Amino acid sequence: MTPKFPSLSSDRLISVLRKAGFEEAPRRGKGSHMALYRPGDPPRLVVVPVRKTLPTGTVRAIIRQAGLTRGEFLDLLDS
């Protein structure tokens, strides 16, 4: 049985993305979102809304945009 995908705080999601090689993209103005960038082939840019809790669907969409599989993400989350 596949474990449920967790809802997370934006801080926790950002820390997992940093473990995956993402770093903060240069500021593109003020706001309630953080852009993270990972160079590579293909380069990836993801935007994370800064909230106390992100809905499960939002977390899944961001992970998909980051190019991570569910298993990769859960491994990074547990480490």
Image (cartoon, rainbow, N blue to C red):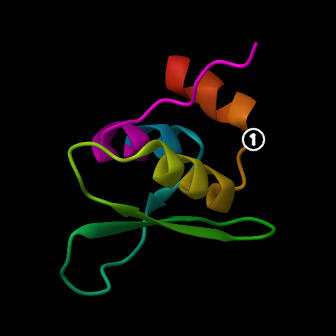
In the image, residue 29 lies at what x, y percent?
Answer: 24, 87
Q: Where is residue 78 in the image (x, y as percent from the top left)?
A: 53, 17
Inspect the image, locate mark 1, and give the three-letter code of the amino acid beneath it: Thr
Write down the region rendered in magenta.
1-14
Residue identified by numbered label 1: 69
Q: Quadrant of residue 30?
A: bottom left
Can residue 79 be seen in this snapshot?
A: no
Q: Does the magenta stretch include residue 11?
A: yes
Residue at coordinates 46% horizontally, 58% vertically from top-left? 23
Above or below — where is 48 with respect to 26? above
Q: Depth check: 35 or 7 in front?
A: 7
Instruction: Residue at 72%, 19% (x, y): give it.
Output: 2
Quarter of the rendering occupied by the N terminus? top right
SS label for mark 1: loop
Report x, y in % for residue 12: 35, 36
Q: Which of 17 and 49 is in front in this view?
A: 49
Please tell me whether the stretch drawn in magenta is mainly helix, strand or loop.
Answer: loop
Left of 35 or right of it: where is 42?
A: right
In the image, taking residue 47 as reference, residue 44 lies left or right, namely: right
Expressed as whole percent of the image width and height from the top left, the position of residue 35 reads 41, 69
